[in-house]
Image (spheres, rainbow, N blue to C red):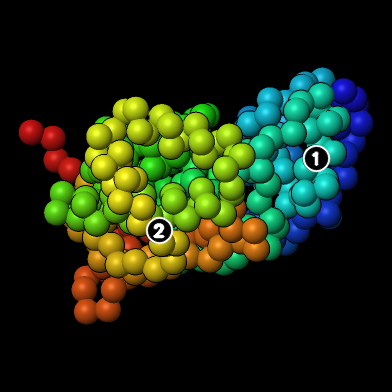
Amino acid sequence: MNLNELGTFVRSRRDRVQPSEAGLVSGPRRRVPGLRRDEVAMLAGASTDYYIEIERGGAQPSEQMLAALARALRLTSDERDHLYRLAGRPLPPSGGSAAHLPPAMLDLLDRLAAVPAFICTDLHVMLVQNRLADALFGPVVPAVGPSASFVHQWFTGVPKARALYPEGDHEHHSRSLVADLRAAAGRRGRGDQEVARLIGNLEQRSEEFSRLWAEREVAVRRTDRKRIRHPSLGILHVNCLSLLSEDGRQRLLWFNPVHGTDSADKLELLSVLGTQDLRTEV
């Protein structure tokens, strides 16, 4: 562990990231070559005071904070590993919630500001999402282990998961999630402990999952048409498209409104409303 060097390293990476690369607007009065400290803190979900302490070598960031910093600073996989070693933290597993995100995939996510978009792992663990996805799906809630997977949440009765979709669509999504998970399990191989824990946990906790898993359907989710339920705007009809990383461990998903529906207008309104809930309390 070398926290002084960690602070120096983080500061050097901050200087090289242009605001536009991080989806920020560069004003005419900017006096620093890269990002400001408060901008890195905002992107990483930390307070400015805490981030300043990291740069000063006075704080040992958690593994979750290191993952957030690596994404905010657009670090390469080698730079990300170096960051963890300087902080005295173990390197995260390649498929977990702290998985490394290629800068090119983050750049593409930033360019999809007009539609909801997010990046998740092949086990449907949410990594990062844009502002419209926050507004449509709700903010990302940090979690570890099998419960971090949306597949786990779907089959174990987490209310938020199934509330996103009309009840009539649940069977379709259940089958699609299981078939996609089997494809991911086959791609990872029998020795992968993360996927083994997820499947084992779901077989114990969900009769529905066990029944569908036994059918051995397999299909990678690449495109889909969805009806998504928003608490204020009602049903949005969207085409869901995805882009897989080279190793298949991560995917970028974005949601375009279906032509001939009012969903484009609703997404435009959602971009204004953000996370406000306009339902009238009775």
At a point 28% along the width and 33% down the height, the residue shown is 206
Asked whether residue 239 appears in the rendered view, the answer is yes
Residue 31 at x, y percent in the picture:
81, 52
Give the vertical position of 214 relative to 116 (above or below). above
Query: Which residue is labeled 1 in the image?
Result: 81
| 148 left or right, relative to 95 | left
Look at the image and tell me in which quarter the C terminus lies.
top left
Residue depicted at 66% across the width and 43% down the height? 94
In which quadrant of the rendered view does residue 278 lie?
top left
Q: Quadrant of residue 205?
A: top left
- What residue appears at the point 61 percent right and 61 percent down from the top-left corner? 245
Mark 2 = which residue? 218
Q: Position of residue 281 (x, y in %)?
A: 13, 35
Q: Give amino acid for label 2.
A: Val
Residue 271 image point, x, y percent:
38, 58
Q: Element at badge 2?
A: loop
Q: Amino acid at mark 1?
A: Asp
Q: Between disc 2 and disc 1, whose residue precedes?
A: 1
Question: How far apart are labels 2 and 1 at the CA level?
Answer: 34 Å
Who's the residue at 22% across and 71% down the image? 262
Residue at the bottom extreme? 260
| Residue 52 visible in image | no
Query: Across the whole image, how many numbered discs are drawn on residues?
Result: 2
- Say which quadrant the N terminus sits in: top right
| In the foreground, 210 or 194 | 210
Q: Residue furthest left?
A: 282
Q: Is 13 drawn above or below residue 56 in the view shown?
A: below
Describe the element under mark 1 as helix, strand or loop. Answer: helix
**Along the horizontal axis of the image, is 190 left or right of 101?**
left
Q: Are marks 2 and 1 in contact (CB under 8 Å)?
A: no
* 174 lies left or right of 31: left
Residues 1 and 42: in front is 1
